[in-house]
């Protein structure tokens, strides 16, 4: 069943009344402004848990574990957080989320750095950075308001260089 609004949208836009055109343009502009990098950064600046829940795409049935969200919440309150646990627990995922959150929050606003370390180089090259690459492909970039990092120039094997142009 067509409603007046769907009839209006399906009609030729040139035939729309001028107030309707202006109203639609205002809605589009406000939606684009809501997705501006600066507003997005302000929204998630102290909310890494919200970043993970709202900005990352999870596969069906996949959700962050409560301890992972606790680690992210602690990261918002403290400069450093240590996590210890067995293999396969999801520590690399939390670290990847934290790297992406920090990089996207501060890009274009400050000179930022996120140092990633491990006891051996292989842990970085085989576990952490592949996880960062995986989750960077799951970011809802349109919501962030910037384009996805380009492999080889911004998203490198063991580094991430973003620039929002602000």
Image (cartoon, rainbow, N blue to C red):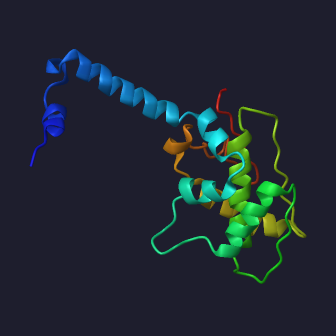
User: Which quadrant of the figure has residue 117?
Assistant: bottom right
Q: Please identify the residue farthest to the right as the structure is shown.
A: 119
Q: Position of residue 44 (x, y in %)?
A: 65, 47
Residue visible at 73% across and 57% down?
A: 98
Q: Nearer the viewer, residue 17 or 119?
A: 17
Q: Quadrant of the C terminus?
A: top right
Observer-nearest of 94 and 74: 74
- Counting from the top left corner in percent of width and height, residue 102 is at 74, 48
Residue 128 at x, y = what percent?
74, 64
Does the rendering let one see residue 138? no
Q: Quadrant of residue 52?
A: bottom right
Location of residue 112 with respect to 85 vertically, above or below:
above
Q: Is residue 61 left or right of residue 110?
A: left
Q: Is residue 83 above or below residue 132?
A: below
> How many tags in the picture?
0
Q: Residue at x 61, y 56 (%)?
A: 50
Percent x, y of residue 164: 64, 32
């Amino acid at each position: 069943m067509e409603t007046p609004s769907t009839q209006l949208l399906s009609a030729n836009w040139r035939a729309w009344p001028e107030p309707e055109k202006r109203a639609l343009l205002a809605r589009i502009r406000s939606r684009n402004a809501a997705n501006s990098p600066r507003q997005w950064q302000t929204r998630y600046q102290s909310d890494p848990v919200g970043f993970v829940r709202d900005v990352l795409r999870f596969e069906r049935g996949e959700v962050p574990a409560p301890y992972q969200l606790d680690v992210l919440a602690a990261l918002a309150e403290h400069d450093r957080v240590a996590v210890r646990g067995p293999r396969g627990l999801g520590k690399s995922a939390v670290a990847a989320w934290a790297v992406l959150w920090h990089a996207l929050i501060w890009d274009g606003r400050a000179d930022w750095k996120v140092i990633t370390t491990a006891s051996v180089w292989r842990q970085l090259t085989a576990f952490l950075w592949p996880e960062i690459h995986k989750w960077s492909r799951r970011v809802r970039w349109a919501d962030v308001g910037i384009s996805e990092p380009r492999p080889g120039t911004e998203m490198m094997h063991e580094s991430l260089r973003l620039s929002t142009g602000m």
